[in-house]
Image: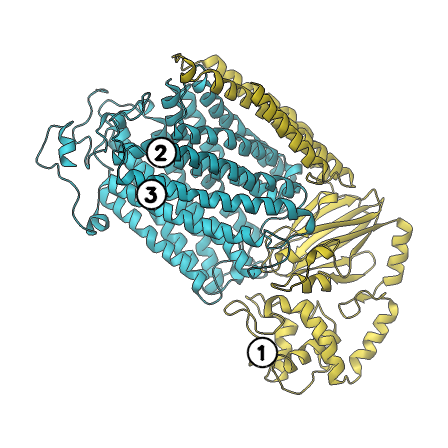
């Protein structure tokens, strides 16, 4: 018996150590996440208790009722009473657990009276955040440095990053102390938006809008992931939320509303001025080298996941840009496939995802990189004309 | 072998051995031959599916992408599951059913022997078709074994081969199930009532009905994928008026009963082995039968617990939470009955018993994490993380796979006439069990800490436990070579087994000679009439 006891103590110790060092569910910073954590720990200890009782009886029997110790088999093989007992007792335990679980579930589903509404749209492989109250809208993509490091055989030591694969260009900014409603949908396949610290996980489904909510109690940076397999780069579309005070949030909204923050000016403080310059940019004549410089940046963020950094694609799955008939052919077909996508394939419509200059740049880049030497440019004005 | 049969049977002129040459296996209608074919097929697939698992674990050994493209990684997770479920566990159980059910019920063979031949021979073609997609342009399926639309519809043209492979596997399973039902109802020894059947026969009877009920549902779901992908329909395309969530409902209406298809025969095996080595009859036989029936019924009304994050109405989430929790009651009854069977028995711990106890302990762990997953608010945190991966591997590897290994060690002397190497059998058990826990237990931790499943690369905080799990995976994988060696050695020769083989064994299969003659029970046993 002392052996069992020692093994049991060692196992408990291991579990406790594991629980103390960030190997457990986070408690989180919303009322729901705290309730969920409480439920998780309750059911965990219930399971531990059941397990301990079951294994104690089992191992006692295995040590005591063995032939080598001279045990003679009994011949009982039925008892209606014990069958009823071990059907009824678990039922009672289940009912006791089900009541608090149901309460939390009801609270989780109550999205009424929200003060802020954010629409979260999943794309392969990024998130779009739209602040429905203020008109702010932007995409959030894996940080460019991480994106380089995570390529097969990049040779980058990924341990140098503090938050490897959990850093984005534009985090979602949210206020603390307000009920925030999320509307989830998708532009292509099913994704799932998860922030463990909020206990918010909801599938983003094309053609459907799902609801969820969070009331963040503490300022801070909270990180999560896409949790529904969504294709090649499912592992590379993190969620980062900056929770700030209500005042800071209002200031941030005022500063950014209603501009669109885009890849080209990611990191830079985007403001109302950006919209004005964007208009001017769309109309002027761009030089080849500036289109190529912007285009490469946009390509690596928006296209390289499928078509690869070298433009060679993946045979059978994603077509090559290098030597492609479309990318070296006439402008209209090339513009159209990027602008409107290709229905029934993984090729998304980028009209809503990229600005006119970004689309023009990336098209020019595709026509003049990877050995495609078409030598012409596509101007932002040509894209603007389509809108 | 015909001479061996003579010892126990009145020799009649039809009593002949197997045909000579390789056509024996191609044309055989003998339940033992077909059982053997199924079991070898399953073993080969076990190493193919296991190899895929090792590719997955090798990539996950360290953060960063070192070995494979993410798309190929996804295709490995997808194929690993399809191979393990449809190519390993299900054929192994059908193989055991073929070998054992006629002998357990005192029947001469399966009721539909030619159908039986066909059921098996579809399988190699189905899996050749499935595995060949890995070598086609665009690679194999990479949308997960659940083939969720619309992601699976983005796949390459090889997707059509995957769907046809699933159709073939389904046809094979349904025919096998029809055969098992027909055998159990028509071929029992005169006088053997249903409630006198061994529990393995009972659990297979119920499993066969589950298969007949749900395989056509899967066939329908994948056929809709096929027409969506190739013929322009919009069953699951919202832009065309379809519904991607409907796919998930249909899939899991198949998928959850499928989970029990993968475990009910295991319950039957464990219910045979524990009484033998405890030298005491199974406790609560009738309640075991009713519990199996209850689990089968509940399996049809819990499917949406796989979908708590898709956005269901509150009432739906409540219903599926409560129904799911209910499953732990009949499952608990089974575990308690097995322990009561051991209680005050006279136990010995030969390899089959070790695997049965391994099953009992680790399946219970998997069952308890299953209860945790039933709590919907908590499930929303657990869903699609490594916690779920840990859970279903605990019920499938030390659950389904261990039961198959226990069954192999248990009945191998009856099949071959030779005792296997007990020492190496035990070594196989202990090495496997240690590595298995090194492999799967840490997955609970990384899952709770926030590691999603089906990702080829992860954040630094998950690095340590992933390295540990990979070491466990390679240890577990390579220790299965011991199993192959012990089985091959036993097939070739060894200490001769007695007819009863095990001291405490009960049941008709132990009344025939070892090895079991090519034809058994041509004259039905008399003890039930």
Q: Residue A72 at x, y = what percent?
A: 39, 12
Q: Residue at x 59, y 83 (%)?
A: A328
Work out whether residue A258 or residue A73 is closer to the camera in this orientation and state it.
Answer: A73
Compared across the picture, whether B435 is left or right of A276 comes to left
Crowd band around label 1 with a 10 angstrom C-alpha radius: few (<14), some (14–19), many (20+) = many
| Residue A322 numbered tag | 1
What distance separates the C-alpha of mark 3 from that of mark 2? 13 Å
Of all chains, the one bearing label 3 is B
Residue position for label 3: B39
Q: On what subunit does the disc labeled 2 rest?
A: B
Query: Residue most toward the left?
Result: B13
**Which chain is rendered cyan in the image?**
B
The secondary element bearing badge 3 is classed as helix
In front of the other: B437 or A332: B437
Q: Is the same chain shared between marks 3 and 2?
A: yes
Give the secondary structure at mark 1.
Answer: loop
Question: Which colour represents chain A?
Answer: yellow
Question: Does residue B146 show up?
Answer: no
Give x and y (percent) for residue B219: 42, 51
| In front of the other: B235 or B119 | B119
Q: Quadrant of residue B34?
A: top left
Q: Which residue is under mark 2?
A: B409
Question: Disc 2 and disc 1: Cα gap in Å?
Answer: 57 Å
Residue A142 in percent (x, y) is at: 71, 60
């Amino acid at each position: 018996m002392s052996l069992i006891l020692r093994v049991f103590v060692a196992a408990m110790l291991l579990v406790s150590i594991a629980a103390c060092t960030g190997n457990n569910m986070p408690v989180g910073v919303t009322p729901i996440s705290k309730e969920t954590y409480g439920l998780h720990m309750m059911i965990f200890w219930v399971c531990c208790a059941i397990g301990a009782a079951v294994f104690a009886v089992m191992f006692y029997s295995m040590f005591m009722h063995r032939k080598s110790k001279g045990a003679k088999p009994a011949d009982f093989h039925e008892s209606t009473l014990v069958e009823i007992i071990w059907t009824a007792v678990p039922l009672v335990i289940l009912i006791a657990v089900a009541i608090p679980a149901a309460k939390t579930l009801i609270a989780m589903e109550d999205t009424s009276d929200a003060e802020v509404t954010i629409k979260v749209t999943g794309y392969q492989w990024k998130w779009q955040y739209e602040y429905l109250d203020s008109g702010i809208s932007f995409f959030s993509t894996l940080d460019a440095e991480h994106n380089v490091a995570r390529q097969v055989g990049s040779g980058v030591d990924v341990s140098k990053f503090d938050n490897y694969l959990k850093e984005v260009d534009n985090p979602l900014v949210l206020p603390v102390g307000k009920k925030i409603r999320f509307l989830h949908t998708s532009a292509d396949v099913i994704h799932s938006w998860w922030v463990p610290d909020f206990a918010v996980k909801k599938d983003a489904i094309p053609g459907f809008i799902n609801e969820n909510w969070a009331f963040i109690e503490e300022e801070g940076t909270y990180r999560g992931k896409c949790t529904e397999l969504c294709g090649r780069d499912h592992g590379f579309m993190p969620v980062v939320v900056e929770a700030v005070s209500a005042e800071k949030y209002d200031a941030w909204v005022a500063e950014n509303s209603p501009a669109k923050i885009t890849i080209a000016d990611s990191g830079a403080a985007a403001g109302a001025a950006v919209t004005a310059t964007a208009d001017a940019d769309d109309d002027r004549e761009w030089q080849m080298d500036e289109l190529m410089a912007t285009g490469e940046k946009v390509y690596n963020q928006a296209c390289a996941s499928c078509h690869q950094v070298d433009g060679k694609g993946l045979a059978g799955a994603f077509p090559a840009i290098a030597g492609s008939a479309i990318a070296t052919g006439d402008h209209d077909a090339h513009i159209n496939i990027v602008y409107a996508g290709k229905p029934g394939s993984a090729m998304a419509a980028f009209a809503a995802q990229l600005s006119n200059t970004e689309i023009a740049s990336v098209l020019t880049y595709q026509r003049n990189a990877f050995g495609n030497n078409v030598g012409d440019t596509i101007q932002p004005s040509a894209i603007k004309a389509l809108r | 072998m015909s001479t061996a049969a003579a010892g126990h049977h009145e020799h009649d002129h039809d009593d002949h051995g197997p045909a000579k040459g390789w056509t024996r296996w191609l044309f055989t209608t003998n339940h033992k031959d077909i059982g053997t074919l199924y079991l070898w097929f399953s073993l080969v697939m076990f190493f193919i599916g296991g190899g895929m698992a090792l590719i997955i674990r090798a990539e996950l050994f360290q953060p960063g992408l070192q070995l494979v493209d993410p798309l190929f990684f996804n295709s490995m997770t997808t194929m690993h599951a399809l191979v393990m479920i449809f190519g390993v566990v299900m054929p192994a159980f059908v193989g055991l059913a073929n070998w054992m059910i006629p002998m357990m019920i005192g029947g001469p063979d399966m009721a539909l022997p030619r159908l039986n031949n066909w059921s098996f021979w579809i399988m190699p073609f189905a899996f050749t078709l499935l595995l060949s997609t890995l070598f086609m342009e665009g690679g194999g399926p990479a949308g997960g074994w659940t083939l969720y639309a619309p992601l699976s519809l983005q796949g390459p043209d090889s997707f059509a081969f995957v769907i046809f492979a699933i159709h073939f596997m389904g046809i094979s399973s349904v025919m096998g199930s029809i055969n098992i039902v027909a055998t159990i109802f028509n071929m029992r020894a005169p006088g053997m009532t249903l409630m006198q059947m061994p529990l393995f026969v009972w659990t297979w009877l119920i499993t066969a009905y589950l298969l007949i009920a749900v395989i056509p549902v899967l066939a329908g779901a994948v056929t809709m994928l096929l027409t969506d992908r190739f013929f322009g329909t919009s069953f699951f395309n919202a832009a065309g008026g379809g519904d991607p969530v409907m796919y998930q409902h249909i899939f899991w209406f198949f998928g959850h009963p499928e989970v029990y298809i993968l475990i009910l025969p295991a319950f039957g095996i464990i219910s045979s082995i524990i009484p033998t080595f405890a030298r005491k009859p199974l406790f609560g036989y009738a309640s075991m039968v009713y519990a199996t029936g209850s689990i089968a019924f509940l399996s049809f009304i819990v499917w949406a617990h796989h979908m708590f994050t898709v956005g269901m109405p509150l009432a739906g989430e409540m219903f599926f939470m409560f129904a799911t929790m209910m499953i732990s009651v009949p499952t608990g009854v089974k575990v308690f009955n097995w322990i009561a069977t051991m209680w005050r028995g006279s136990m010995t711990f030969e390899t089959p018993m070790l695997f049965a106890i391994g099953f009992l302990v680790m399946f219970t762990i998997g069952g308890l994490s299953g209860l945790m997953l039933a709590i919907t608010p908590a499930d929303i945190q657990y869903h699609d993380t490594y916690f779920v991966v840990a859970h279903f591997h605990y019920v499938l590897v030390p659950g389904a796979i261990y039961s198959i290994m226990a069954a192999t060690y248990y009945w191998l002397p009856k099949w071959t006439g030779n005792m296997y190497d007990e020492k190496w059998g035990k070594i196989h058990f202990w090495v496997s069990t240690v590595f298995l826990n090194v492999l799967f237990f840490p997955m609970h931790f990384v899952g709770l800490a926030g590691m999603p499943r089906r990702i080829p690369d992860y954040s630094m905080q998950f690095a340590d436990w992933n390295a540990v799990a990979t070491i466990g995976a390679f240890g577990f994988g390579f220790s299965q070579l011991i199993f192959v060696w012990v089985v091959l050695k036993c097939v070739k020769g060894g200490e001769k087994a007695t007819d009863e083989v095990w001291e405490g064994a009960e049941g008709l299969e132990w009344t025939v000679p070892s090895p079991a003659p090519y034809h058994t029970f041509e004259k039905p046993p008399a003890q039930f009439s």
